Image (cartoon, rainbow, N blue to C red):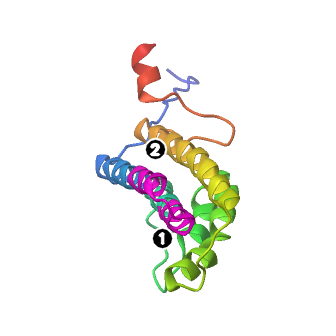
Amino acid sequence: MTGTRTTTRRTATVDPRLALRARELLGRAEAMAAHAADSPEPTEQLRALYLAALRAAGAALVVGEKSTTRPRRGPVSAWARLPRALPELTTWATYFAGLSRLRADIELGVVRDVDPGTVQATRTRLVDFMDEVQAQVVAFEHGTRATAGHRPATLTELSAG
């Protein structure tokens, strides 16, 4: 037919290996968060919470970074890469990057005391950050992309509806 245009909606091809890797990293993040909750020492709690956030950032980068945007040389922190790959996670990257020095000082033994309020604030933010990353992973698995302020339905919600 002349003059008729057909449009086809493209769906993204999902690499199941990437989805699995992201889920593994989220599982590690959850394990580190549980370790933090079990520790009586605020310094160890903060260290474990930071590492949990780092694993969650790794999960986000697995599903958010294109292979062409991954750095080829030199160390580049997850917190520097995250805003480039997923701009909607910039606030989280900024917050956790701000804790990098403190976490390093804890590991060096330079810092021995951490304010419990800082630990609690970090725990609260970690939970929210992990929820955002979970939304990114679910969106990736469905061939879409989560955007700020919009959480795609979880697998449980999709199967119920």
Q: Is residue 87 visible?
A: no
Residue 70, disc: 1
Magenta-span inclusion, residue 31: yes
Mark 2 lies on residue:
137
Magenta-span inclusion, residue 88: no
Nearest the viewer among 103 and 5 is 103
Identify the residue at image location x=67%, y=54%: 121
Relative to 20, 78 lies left or right: right
Instruction: Report the amino acid beneath label 2.
Output: Val
Looking at the image, the residue that sits furthest to the top is 161
Identify the residue at image location x=43%, y=53%: 38
Q: Earlier in the sequence, mark 1 or mark 2?
A: 1
Nearest the viewer among 94 and 9 is 94
Relative to 16, 94 lies left or right: right
Establish if 103 lies above or below 109. Answer: above
Identify the magenta region: 30-51
Disc 1 is placed on an element classified as loop
Q: Name the spot of residue 73 as percent of width and height, x first.
A: 47, 85
Assess whether mark 2 and mark 1 are in contact (beta carbons under 8 angstroms).
no
Identify the residue at image location x=37%, y=44%: 14
Label 1 neighbourhood size at 10 Å, few (<14), some (14-19), many (20+)? Answer: few
Q: Name the spot of residue 20 as percent of width and height, x first.
A: 31, 48
Identify the residue at image location x=41%, y=56%: 35
Nearest the viewer among 118 and 150 is 118
Establish if 92 lies above or below 12. Answer: below
Label 2 neighbourhood size at 10 Å, few (<14), some (14-19), many (20+)? Answer: many
Q: Name the spot of residue 77 as percent of width and height, x first.
A: 54, 75
Kindly report the secondary structure that dominates the magenta region of the rendered protein. helix
Residue 140, disc: none
Real-space Cα separation, disc 1 to disc 2, in angstroms: 18 Å
